[in-house]
Amino acid sequence: MTSTSISDFYPGVADFARVGTASPVEEISRPSLSYWQDVWIRLKKNSRATISLYIVIALAVFTLLGPLFWQVDPFLQDLNQISQAPSLRKSATLVGAYKRWDGIVLSDFPVEPQEYMESVAAVTGLQTFETATTQQVRLIWDPLTGSAGYNIYRNHRLPEGFNDLGLPLGSTYGANEVSYEDRLSLESRTYYYSIVPTDGYDEYEVYTIIEVRPQMIITVSEAEGRGLISEAEEGNLGQEIRLEFHPFGTDYLGRDMLARLMEGARVSLFIGIVAPLIFVLFGVIYGGCAGYFGGTLDALLMRFADFVVALPFLLFMILFKIAFGIGPGESGIFPMLLALILLAWPATARLVRGQVLQIREQGYIEAAQLLGAKPQYLIFRHIIPNTMGVILVTLTFAVPSAIFTEAFLSFIGMGVAPPTPSWGSMCNEGVKTMLSHPHELIFPAAFISVTVLAFNLLGDGLTEALDSRMRSRE
Amino acid sequence: MLAYTLKRLLAGVITVWFIATATFIAMHMVPGDPLMNDKAVSAEIRKNLEQKYGLDKPVTEQYFIYLGNMLRGDFGISFTQQNRRVNDIIRDHFPVSATLGLLAIFFAATGGVLWGALTAIYRNRMPDIIIMFLVILGISVPSFVFAALGQLMLVNINSMLGYSLIPVAGWGTFAHMLMPSLVLGLGTMAFLTRLMRSSMLEVVNADYIKTARAKGLSPVRIFFRHQLRNAILPVITVLGPSIAAITTGGFVVELVFAIPGLGRYFVQAVQQLDYTVIMGTTVFYGAFLVFMVIIVDILYGFVDPRVRLE
Amino acid sequence: MSDHILEVENLSVEFSTYGGNVKAVRGVSFNVNRGQTLAIVGESGCGKSVTVQAIMGIIPMPPGRITGGSAKLNGHELLGLSSKEANKFRGIQIGMIFQDPMTSLNPTMTIGDQIAETLMVHRGKSHSQALKQAVDLLEKTHIPEARKRVKQYPFEFSGGMLQRAMIAQSLACKPSILIADEPTTALDVTIQAQILELMAELQRTENMSIILITHDLAVVARMADEVAVMYAGQIVETGSVDDIFYESSHPYTLGLKSAMPSNTGSREKKLTPINGSPPDLFSPPQGCGYFTRCPYAMRLCDKKQPINFVVRGKQNHRSRCWLQHGDAPEVAAIHQNNSGQSRAD
């Protein structure tokens, strides 16, 4: 064994003086916190749970206060604005009604070449005729010797080669027919038009490209129909008109997505919050009774709960719908609520029963009983406060599952039906146009996911806060 | 073990009886005659049904006729499809749903165990953080959104390749089954991953792992022989309920991917209020789920000796 | 070859936690003699389990960390080995049993398989050979109907039987040292005696050394040849079992003894608890860890770590206490032979 060298240390006489050994009285140095204060502090330390809490608050604001700031009718259909992608505010120039254009057919140019040519040069002089607008794009070009007609193509991006010219719009027949008018669902974006000369049947492998960006316009009659201008303004052709603003785009009937999401949030969150509140409360009372009284009653109650768990939810949903006289294709918010409440409580009941049974065995209950506490006192003073944590966690996790159920039912067409929006029914509609207009699915799906995510993380945080509270007391 | 199995089976039979009875009562609580509610019932079907179910007889007698039919495994005739027996519908379409469900369970269980073990090993390090983030996402996104996104992905892959590598919808080959079952299993996989992770973390700190290390076993042997086997137990116990979740999810996935399964049929029946099909499939699904849970519980006994020998 | 089979020198272990680094073991040194029993005694949390787990290399790292020292088994260093190298002595030369036999065996493997596993891994035996040997081992630890018992699972065993099985498992490769970490704490008193007896018997027949970790002085008195008293991550007193019981020279050892009931003391004599609590090992005190609780504390004790003094010239009896310094005032209980206190059996 090592013996430490003490050569550098010589204790003096004073060092060996005895000191008092009054062992310090244990002091409580920190202020004592109540159970919920402590849980709250732990929850606040959990950043994920805190963010989730903010998200939940933001959702509540979005649902309750949103319609005050965004006063757009969620049911207003606008068939001119079907499936608009989300965009910033747009404006358009007011123009008169569409006027027919006959195009240009040169009379001094031969319709067909004298003889068939193996190859020709590309078309020259391709340009727009008048201003390109979302109403029409008019193209003209110089006649090409050797051709017997022209094919016109349109693409969203710059073509990479001859096989990438995009949408074939049409053809002209005759070398002297040197104009084309495109009116095919034009938007205010860049297009690449290509002209390919033909021999009347087949194309020559040359092409000419022009980049066109049509100007956003609106006709007087359309603007009036959409209520964008008053009659007095009819004459102001060329005026800039502000179009309806759809920050989240529109759905397949041209309804504003943002307004529908707010309206849908009311339905989804109503079911997602009211149903759990009621069935958790019922489960608590049911499970509490079973646990507190125990014995035969307990066995009987829990056996019944086991059977209820096995009951098919969808069937009862249908039956309630019929019982309330709601036909297929109509909204059944109330039957859905009822089915949820009647069938979802057993899980909570079982949990609370277990908790109560456990608490009943604790020493402090026995101690209170010995001191003469009445059942009422035991229940309200000891049992309920000690099960509160578990109940709160159950409630937090019940919300996302109820939202899921609503979404699922509405998605298969059993819950909320058109025209009433809910996030689930919006997904149901959005999935049909998913490939062409993904925003109609993505927005409601994202709202469901974020809500469920927030409640899940909040539940996790709460469980952790309560758990560590328990652990630190051991 | 035998007594346990018999007890569970008996409880299962009682539960199925309860479901059947509740279904019957519920159908009769509906105002009016269940057949009156649908205009589409033709006179011929109506006559057949009245005869079959004895709708002119008292309710108690009807109940026993109904139970008798169920016991014989006769679920009746479809309201909306003339002369098509519900039994035939189940026989034709259930195997498709079962294949889809089994594949989904397989993906969910293997994925859940694998990812869960991985996150536990890399606890609080990058792989853990990334996987747990995906898990939370997986739990929070509804299955129909996964289905839609999965389909969208296939469309994009196929259009990028220029040919159909994996079919976007339909049923038939293994390639058809791949995406739907993956999508269907995703939510359950996320849930199982979470469970496996916490179970692994508990096992890692268990005393018997310390013993195994003190015995001089290699880390690989400890992982496979001692940790994994014990950590997997809680995962197996929730497989039963998971089958129920996957069955319900299957309705939606079959709808989105146009798979001719019983789930899609059920949803259609629900939308058309085809009572006999609804009742028949409900009782069938109820019985299926009840017995699946029992089978899983019995299988669990083979893995956990403590249950086996009780 | 020295007669020390295991030499531990200046071992230090830290754990990093959210609250900071816990210095759980602070420079521990001791030797284990061939064929003898060393008891490490101390209250819970003093670092005795961590010490042996560090030697075995089974401290979870992280959060644990061996910050210094050495442990030599027959002259071979054990600390800082890779798990592959460490597995050449773990379970072969050193066996270990734990406090709670109920949780220390894998619940999903048969007892036989768990014992056989060691033999299969270290001795390369076949499964059937290893199982056969497992039966012999169970018989050696006096488990009745061993042939039937090997096929059973831990939950079918009682606590005492499980501890016997644990011992059988640790003996599989005939180790030269058995580390027993509180082997009887979780057991009934009657079972405790049986297990201790079994260990003593096996020590004789197998000629092994035992490191016995306990907080029970009665167990120490019964089993130990040498004793190390641990407090707050340090060994405060070492010596033969007689030195510790009859000539204890550290106030902590004295405190432990007077807190222990005995069957010969007079009825009026009250048990004296040690007041206060051990120091916070997040920031160990500058001086002696026992300062705040010591009835003989001096000004010096708070300032300076005591040296490991030789007690009364006996090289094997050491005490980490300033009272052993030549200039320190005499304390009757320490400086006179305290054989008035009986050895508890």
Image: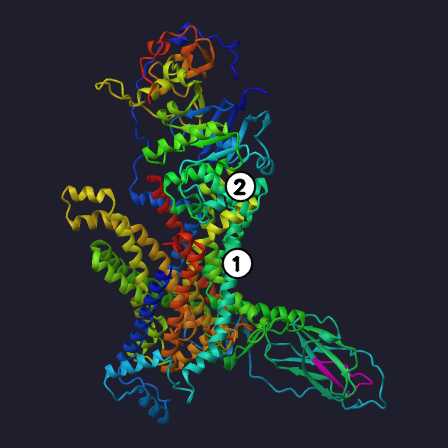
Residue C290: x %, y % from top left = 38, 20
The magenta segment is A140-152
Q: Residue B238 appears in which quarter of the rendering?
A: bottom left
**Would you name the residue on which mark 2 appears?**
C118
The chain carrying label 2 is C
Relative vertical location of residue B28 with respect to residue B192 in this rendering, above or below: below
Front in this rendered view, residue C137 or C121 = C137
Q: Secondary structure at mark 2?
A: helix
> How far is disc 1 from disc 2 in space, using C-alphas?
32 Å
In the figure, is residue A161 to the left or right of C103? right
**Which quadrant does the C terminus of chain A fall into?**
top left
Residue A88 appears in the rendering: no
| Crowd tier of the residue under label 1, counting other residues whose Cα lies within 10 Å: few below 14, some 14–19, many 20 or above | some
Identify residue type, mark 2: Thr
Front in this rendered view, residue B289 or C133 = C133
| Crowd tier of the residue under label 2, counting other residues whose Cα lies within 10 Å: few below 14, some 14–19, many 20 or above | many
Q: Residue A176 appears in which quarter of the rendering?
A: bottom right
In the figure, is residue A461 to the left or right of C132? left
Identify residue type, mark 1: Gly
Residue A187: x %, y % from top left = 59, 74
**Would you name the residue on which mark 1 appears?**
B111
| A145 part of magenta stretch | yes
Front in this rendered view, residue C81 or C210 = C210
Can you tell which mark lies on residue B296? none
Q: Secondary structure at mark 1?
A: helix
Residue drawn at x 25%, y 87% is B57
